[in-house]
Amino acid sequence: MKSMKLNIRQKLVIFTCALVVVIGGAFSMYAFHEGHEQLLDGFDQKSRGMAQVIASSVAQEISSRNRESLAQRLKAILANQQIE
C-alpha cells in the first residue's frame, strides 16, 4: 500500500478549516450563552413587575377591607397558570 503524504498546501488547508470550525463553534456557544442570559434577565424583570402589581393591588384590597373583591382577585390569580 502506498502511504498518502500531505504537502504543505494540503496541511495549510486542513489547519485553516479546523481553525474556522473551532473559532466558529466557540463564537456560537458564546452567543447562545449570552442570549440565554438575556432571556432569563428579561423574564426575571417581568416576573418581578407582575408580582409588584399584584402585591400593590392586594394591599389596596386589604386596606379598603373589601373582602369579596379580594377573594375574587385571589381566585383569579390562583387560576392563572402563568403565575406560580
Image: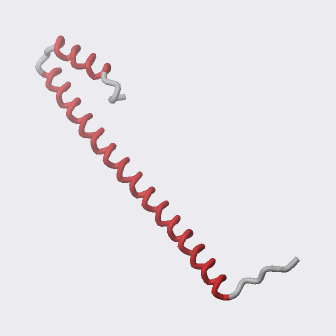
Question: Is 36 left or right of 65, judged from the image as shown?
Answer: right
Name the residue furthest top.
Answer: 68
Name the residue furthest front.
Answer: 1
Name the residue furthest left.
Answer: 64
Which x, y percent locates residue 29?
A: 49, 60
Name the residue furthest right.
Answer: 1
| Residue visible at 11% across and 19% down in the picture | 64
* The quarter of the displayed image where residue 49 is located: top left
| Residue visible at 18% across and 31% down in the picture | 56
Which x, y percent locates residue 67?
A: 18, 13
Question: Is 15 left or right of 35, judged from the image as shown?
Answer: right
Front-lying residue, 76 or 7 = 7
Give the quadrant of the N terminus: bottom right
* The quarter of the displayed image where residue 34 is located: bottom left
Give the quadrant of the C terminus: top left
Question: Is 41 left or right of 33, judged from the image as shown?
Answer: left
| Residue visible at 83% across and 80% down in the picture | 3
Which x, y percent locates residue 16?
A: 57, 78
Chosen colour scheme: secondary structure
How many discs mark residues in the rendered view? 0
Which x, y percent locates residue 58?
A: 20, 25
| Residue visible at 15% across and 21% down in the picture | 61
Question: Is 69 left or right of 39, judged from the image as shown?
Answer: left
* The quarter of the displayed image where residue 83 is located: top left
Check the image and report above or below for 82 versus 13. above
Check the image and report above or below for 81 versus 9. above
